Image (cartoon, coloured by chain):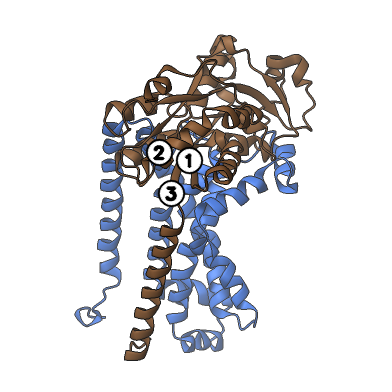
Amino acid sequence: MQALWLSFRLAATVSALLLLLATPLAWWLSQTRWRAKFLIESIVALPLVLPPTVLGFYLLVLFGARSPLGKLWTDLFGHPLAFTFTGLVFASILYSLPFAVQPLVAAFERVDPRLLDAAAVLGAGRWRAFREILLPLSVPGVVTALVLSFAHTLGEFGVVLMVGGDIPGVSRTVSIAIYDHVQALDYAAANRLALALLFIAFAVLCTVYALNRRVWSPWPARHAR
Amino acid sequence: MHWNGKSARFGASLAALLLFASHSFAQQKRQIRVAAAGDLQAAMPELARVFELQTGIHAEVQFGSSGNFFAQIQNGAPLDVFFSADSDYPRKLEAAGFAAPHSGVVYAIGSIVIWMPASASCDLPRLGWRCLLDPGIKRIAIANPDHAPYGRAAVAALRGAGLYDQLQEKLVLGENISQAALFVQSGNAEAGILARALTLAPALRDGKRWEIPASLYPRIEQSVIVLKSANDAAAADEFVKFATSGPGRKILLNSGFRLPAVMPAAAAARQP
């Protein structure tokens, strides 16, 4: 139960933070005409391609006392970033970044640019146009980003295994706990946790997609606008 | 992409070529597939190299945690020989009928050390345990005691030294002993309790180490078994014999293991 609760907390924290970080980034990506934009897009998509062990290994090196960042963090807070909940949040944000950014960019790009132009002509600033036009028209994208980053973090394994240190209540997430049970040949316990995770994941996805259907249906004809 | 006749023919001939190549390659050379515990990281490549020189049999080695291999073998993993980091897993596999009868042999005795990076300020070789009590030690990496033999030994040693309750909060668990080593080597933990053989591998050789008295933890007897499903049982037997006799024992000794004093009874019984 402790492990399930921890995973839930981690996923909620990460998806909330990711929405805050990914929205401006996605907005910028959808609006910019900068020619080297593909560089940023590639970096954002990297965690999709890299095995979690690679990401976890680099993070471990980055967090370590030998790296400038690791040293700075240890000087400031008195302990390394690895093996802490904060460290896991940091790692998971990187790991789930594309799952938040890509649906948002897609949603923002679908918004008719003429609407934004019209808003600008009518004197709305960029922030107001974003808040009152772009965001309301992109709700499905925002929901998708939130759900995907939540789900992806909930099921995260490799990165947590690499930087977590398997501390109960801090970094023993549900996927790690299941793995530990399997390793210890306690298949019954592994099965219980795995089933619980399966049901929770399914329930979360069902809820969100059901809600999302009310907001945005794949069959627009049924909706009277 | 369109599939037309030309590319289909090309694909088919490519597949045929690959099939032919792999088939003829397999016929060329005798080969065994070896699963090895993480603490053999340094010893096993050398064992395989010398063995191939002597016999012409190629040993394809994969490293992992003993617990993982245990589960994989029970589910039909295509392996011939299994070098475990303990004797329990091989014994259980033998009892469950996955090992060739009487193939279990103790090939090495593992030992554990406290390891710290060379840059550590504490004089580890002189102070031993007392270095772990230094306030600068925030994290101590060990392998997970629930499923890694070396993790169990580390916890037993900490208990034996009367330090477990005091240091428990500082323990971080690697999934296996190599990962625990990575935690310390990368500077995320200040000290680790690691397999001695692992700390003699190139990446860790320069650090400080202190041998934990063997009386503080149960003896880590490491066994090897030949699997019943082995493709080439004769070659697998030969590799085990090599690892547990003259040159193989010397390689294991040089890699930081202790050796079983006499040739174990099981191996003697296996001799015709």
Q: Which chain is brown?
A: B
Query: Which residue type carries mark 2?
Result: Phe
Name the chain letter of the residue that bears numbered label 2.
B
Mark sitting earlier along the chain (2/1): 1
**Badge 1: few (under 14), some or many (20 or more) residues near its Cα, within 10 Å?**
some
Instruction: Please state which amino acid type lies under the numbered disc 3.
Output: Ala
Q: Colour of chain A?
A: blue
Residue B40: x %, y % from top left: 56, 35
Question: In percent of the image, x 59 and y 67: which residue is there?
Answer: A43
Quadrant (top left, top right, bottom left, bottom right) of the C terminus of chain B: top left
Q: Which mark is residue B69?
A: 2
Which is more toward the observer, A100 or B249? Answer: B249
Q: Nearer the viewer, residue A9 or B239?
A: B239
Label 3 chain ID: A
Question: Label 1: which residue?
Answer: B64
Q: Percent position (x, y) of residue B79?
A: 38, 44
Please give the residue where the numbered disc 3 appears in the rendered image.
A12
